[in-house]
Image: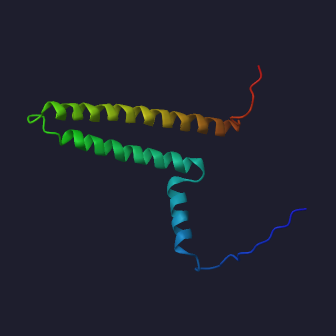
Amino acid sequence: MKFKLSLAKKKKGFDCSIIEGCKSIVNKLFGSGVDKYFKAVNISIIVIFVTVLNYIYNFDIKKLKNKDKNLLYMYYGFLACLVGFAISINWIYFEYSKNKKKRISPLDVKSN
């Protein structure tokens, strides 16, 4: 037998807290469950990508020294790594959503 104890009473009407309101807004924007984390990671990747592109475009090519040129190459390398990371994260999300539609658990053993 299972007994449910409701220690906290639910408030009815307009008596909800600000935190619950923020949680519901975040759930409506990003979704719920694992989808929310994938979307948050994608948004953060886009923000970092735009920031690095801003650094690259604001670089003055005429006044470059050898160290500054290495810094510019480092920005390009970081941008390439960021694109690879974004592709891998979105590939994982694609596989997750594909398996979610099929209702296959990743722990299931496939038998041929």
Count of numbered badges drawn on the protein: 0
- Residue shown at 54% from the left, 51% from the top: 36
Image coordinates of residue 44 in percent, x first then y, are: 41, 47
Q: Position of residue 26 (x, y in %)?
A: 51, 60
Q: Considering depth in this image, is 8 or 90 the residue closer to the camera?
A: 8
- Position of 64 with respect to 42 (left or right) is left
**Front residue of this view, candidates 31 and 87:** 87
Q: How is the image coloured?
A: rainbow
Residue at the image point whose x is 38% and y is 36% from the top = 82
Give the position of the C terminus as an image quadrant: top right
Q: Residue furthest top?
A: 112
Residue 46: percent from the left, percent from the top? 37, 44
Task: Please name the residue shown 51% across and 53% down the image.
Answer: 30
What is the x, y in percent for residue 53? 27, 40
* Residue that sits furthest to the left in the current view: 62
Q: Is residue 98 left or right of residue 66?
A: right
Quadrant assignment for the N terminus: bottom right
Q: Outermost residue, front direction? A: 67
| Vertical order, 73 against 11 (above or below) | above
Identify whether 103 is placed above or below 36: above
